[in-house]
Image: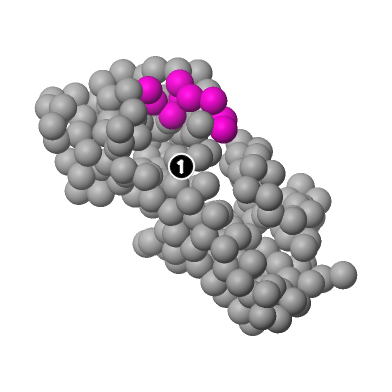
Amino acid sequence: MEIVLATKNRKKIEEIKKICDTIGTDFKIYTLDDFPQYQDIEEDGDTFEANAVKKAVYISKRTGMTALADDSGLEVDALNGAPGVFSARYAGESADDRANLEKLLREMKNIPPEKRRARFVCCIAMASGDEVRTFHGYVEGVIGTEPRGENGFGYDPVFYPEGHDRTFAEMSDSEKNALSHRGAALRELQKYLLEKTDTSGDIGDNS
């Protein structure tokens, strides 16, 4: 099955490819780097699903291929769900991971350990022709008080998944992917494709 990932985010692309390899999806993966005439699509929706669907539909229509788009982020209970859909630009439109992380820690400076609950959320949208499907993944955890670990990206250095004493950034790729919100959403996608193939045998056939 040929798919195009509707993103130019190298870290996200690498992670999705690693997860797909691990769970055994039979994907030949293209990215927007293979279609330089198309740029990243603005994420102006008010939900992760709205952003993912917008990106997948746009790229599928332009390329004629099955497109996958991911929108994901961090929701912190004590911040009323922030940064949420603004996770990638929490500290401003041009902010990098470090600036976003520093702002999060400033906002949570006086929040006690028992009130630092948070979750990573991921929505993956698949658009193929007129069909659009969405798949969701979640991982609960808590926010630490300082960054730990060098792996991963985004808020990984301060996120402790539930039941673990290491942050995502302290885990190996395989450890994180087995627990992560993105891994969970991709496994839901894989389950759907296997069921669809069993009944029709023609999902996403672009050959």
Between 34 and 195, the one lying in front of the other is 195
Q: In which quarter of the image is residue 137?
A: bottom left
Residue located farthest toward the right when viewing the structure as drawn: 207
**On the rendered structure, is 206 left or right of 66?**
right
Q: Which amino acid does label 1 sit on?
A: Ser
**On the rendered structure, is 102 left or right of 96?**
left
Which residue is located at x 60 percent, y 39 percent?
15
Secondary structure of the residue carrying numbered label 1: loop
Quadrant showing the C terminus: bottom right
**Is residue 130 shown to the viewer in this render?**
yes
**On the rendered structure, is 88 left or right of 205?**
left
Q: Position of residue 103 (x, y in %)?
A: 31, 29
| 169 within the magenta span | yes
Sort mark 1 into few (<14), some (14-19) or many (20+) by Cα contacts within 10 Å. Answer: many
| 149 within the magenta span | no
Residue at the spot of label 1: 180
Tell me where the magenta segment starts and ends, as one range: 166-174
Quadrant showing the N terminus: bottom right
Q: Quadrant of residue 200?
A: bottom right
Give the vertical position of 75 relative to 62 (above or below): above
Please tell me how many numbered marks the rendered image carries.
1
Which residue is located at x 54 percent, y 55 percent?
187
**Is residue 82 shown to the viewer in this render?**
no
Q: Position of residue 57 (x, y in %)?
A: 61, 70
Q: Where is residue 27 in the image (x, y as percent from the top left)?
A: 74, 55
Give the vertical position of 202 relative to 144 (above or below): below
Q: Where is residue 152 in the image (x, y as percent from the top left)?
A: 52, 29
Between 135 and 40, the one lying in front of the other is 135
Which residue is located at x 14 percent, y 35 percent?
115
Please name the colour scheme applied to the rendered image: one colour
